[in-house]
Amino acid sequence: MVSTVSETRPGYGQLLRTPGAWTFLLPGFAARQPFAMLTIGIVLLVQHTTGSYGSAGVVAAVTGVSMALFAPQSGKLADRFGQRAVLFPGVLVHTASVVTLTSLALAGAPLWALFIAAVPTGASVPQVGPMVRARWAAKLDGSPLMTTAAAFESVTDEFTFVIGPVLTTALCTGIHPAAGLITEATLTLLGGLVFAAQRRTQPVVGGREEGHTSVRPVSALSVPGVRVLAVAFLGIGAVFGGMQVSLTAFAEEIGQPGVNGLMYGVFAAGNMLAGIICGAVAWKTGPKFRLLAAYTALAVTASGLWAMHTAPLVAGLGLLVGLCIAPALISGYTLVETLVPASARTEAFTWLTGSVALGQAAAVSVAGELTDAYSSSAGFLVPMGGTVLALAVLLALRSRLTPRGSGPGTEPDSGPAVPVGRDTERDSARERESGTSQGAGHGAGRGIGRGIGHRVPVSVD
């Protein structure tokens, strides 16, 4: 089902030599840490101050729900007014909110006060990951490098989930229970401000393309396929949230609290390894087929976590779960680019990341209550339930993941919604005018879709 990488397929090295890429990649990496550090940092701090995983999970859940609800609005504002206009106030509000939440927790404030502080903390999380993806898409639109960029971003996301929870756990257990959140706020402030300052690489405001203007803004959520993918990403969030709480409780139960970060790191390392592999092969199957296959494997592996009772078994199965997540995420992000017009691209990405946050929040809350009432084994039922339910929705509504030439979310000027995701007549005109194509290998990549490694316009659904 896969072929070896050929000389015609761009690689990571060529992608990273894209002019201006490092100016947004490095600060973007620091500024996207909140997604990996915030939830586990709240869980560890509030559990320390209250002694309850349930209370810690609920506070983290409020943060996650707030982030999920406000993230798409942040993406929509970025599409309309520009990333810089959204990021500058956002990172300042987030930093102040995290400091407030941390101070209240350490002061022993009542739970309702923590809930109030958790709302702006989650709502102001900067959506740097989707913004970086939007910058790649604007810079490489139509280039075969776009497929490599999709894989690279997923690898970067997984890498943050390797180091984020491990770093947060080490800081909270080795220095101070609040050290994880303080570090998260510092990275957000510094990285976010530097990222926002990179004006030359941000997408053109309003989704306009060179010599071309969108007729009207379109809501990404009006596209049926985006709603289906959002449900799938809810299930992935349930895995992240359920494992964060359950692994922490499991480590406490076996008397080795420090092993929590290691076990979660193994799980996240599986995500990163799978992401690297996905970007290193040229797939002949379509992204929809790969999403369904990866998600089925994810549901199967996640369903066995509750039965593992030793650290090596939990870590081993967690590695397998992690290996299934990256292919599902990459396929989902690849599909969404073919479903929505460029003017709604950042919003679409934030709906997916927001869905992960919402699923994570719900899972943290439910797993925390189950862990308090029973044990960590009960908490591990949450990843199983979330992925099985989401898989059922994916299978039932899989036809909505096929791009169409008309319907909600298709703009009059956006071109046919085919797997290549381009208006070929418009691009041909551009090529005749410029004599060259945008991005390396553009002409050779005309038959390459937006899927990871699509080298021929053939898809197996």
Image: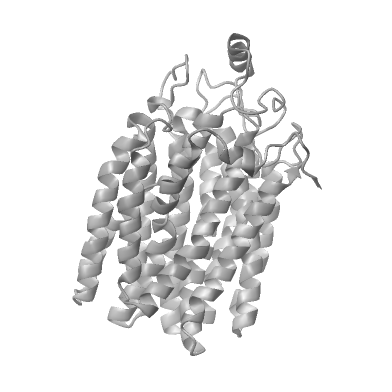
Residue that protrudes farthest toward the bottom in the picture: 255
Q: Position of residue 371 (x, y in %)?
A: 45, 80
From where the camera sits, is residue 434 visible? Answer: yes
Q: Position of residue 196 (x, y in %)?
A: 34, 40
Q: Residue at x 50, y 38 (%)?
A: 21
**Quarter where residue 417 is shown:** top right
Q: Residue at x 32, y 30 (%)?
A: 81
Q: Residue at x 31, y 58 (%)?
A: 186
Colour style of the rendered protein structure? one colour
Vertical order, 29 against 47 (above or below) = above
Vertical order, 29 against 348 (above or below) = below
Task: Choose between 127 and 395: the one closer to the eye.
Answer: 127
Task: Choose between 119 and 394: the one closer to the eye.
Answer: 119
Task: Choose between 207 and 444: the one closer to the eye.
Answer: 444
Count of number-bearing discs: 0
Quadrant of image for the C terminus:
top right
Left or right of residue 451: residue 140: left
Q: Position of residue 239 (x, y in %)?
A: 53, 64
